[in-house]
Amino acid sequence: MNFHHHKNDMNKINIMVLTISDTRDKETDKSGQLIIDLLKNTNYRLSIYQIVRDEKEVIKNTIIEGCEDSKIDVIITNGGTGLSKRDVTFETLNEIYEKPILGYGELFRFLSYQEIGSAAMLSRACAGIVKNTVIFSTPGSTNAVKLAMEKLILPEIQHIVSEIRKD
């Protein structure tokens, strides 16, 4: 995989990884750790790793804080995208996106459908831009994180950040 097809666009990109879960901690957060592991073999720098509860105000405040941090270019979340009453990541992010990136969720569900069939429609993976920071939201399962990271996020991070930085 060529993750650097836009390599002339910029230097290092700083990433915040945010796990949204009521049950995980740093020892049991396999999906957050997978994101971190997949970033290690790239030009991207992990700046912040955090776990927050699946609560609207906590998610919103943490995301806005990350977007206001001039050192953070990209936020990758995992978890909270399901259909249960506790899953509020999708609603929270869609309230604050200045520019949604609709193709991300569409492509994620398409690729997921190829792997798991019609259950892919339950995914509410989404992406968008807030304060010149791109936010990618993935489901909490490690298979979903691997799919999103390898097929969608890593190949396009530099391109998207470059587009956001244009005048």
Image: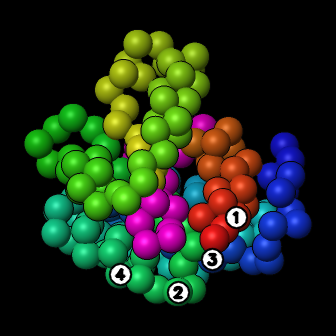
Q: Quadrant of residue 56?
A: bottom left
Helix, strand or loop at mark 3 = strand
Task: Indicate whether 32 appears above or below 108.
Answer: below
| Residue 144 lies within the magenta run | yes
Find the residue positioned furthest to the left. Answer: 85
> Disc 3 marks which amino acid?
Asn
Disc 2/disc 1 C-alpha distance (Å): 15 Å
Q: Earlier in the sequence, mark 4 or mark 1?
A: 4
Sequence-first tag of 2 and 3: 3
Residue at label 1?
A: 162
**Quarter the N terminus occupies:** top right
The residue located at (63%, 76%) in the rendering is 14
The C terminus, quarter of image = bottom right
What residue type is disc 1 on?
A: Ser
Residue 115 in the image, given as x and y percentages of width and height: 56, 20
Magenta residues, start to end = 129-147
Q: Earlier in the sequence, mark 3 or mark 1?
A: 3
Q: Earlier in the sequence, mark 2 or mark 4?
A: 4
Residue contact at pointers 4 and 1, CB within 8 angstroms = no
Secondary structure beneath dot 4 equals: helix
Name which residue lies at 68% across and 74% down: 13
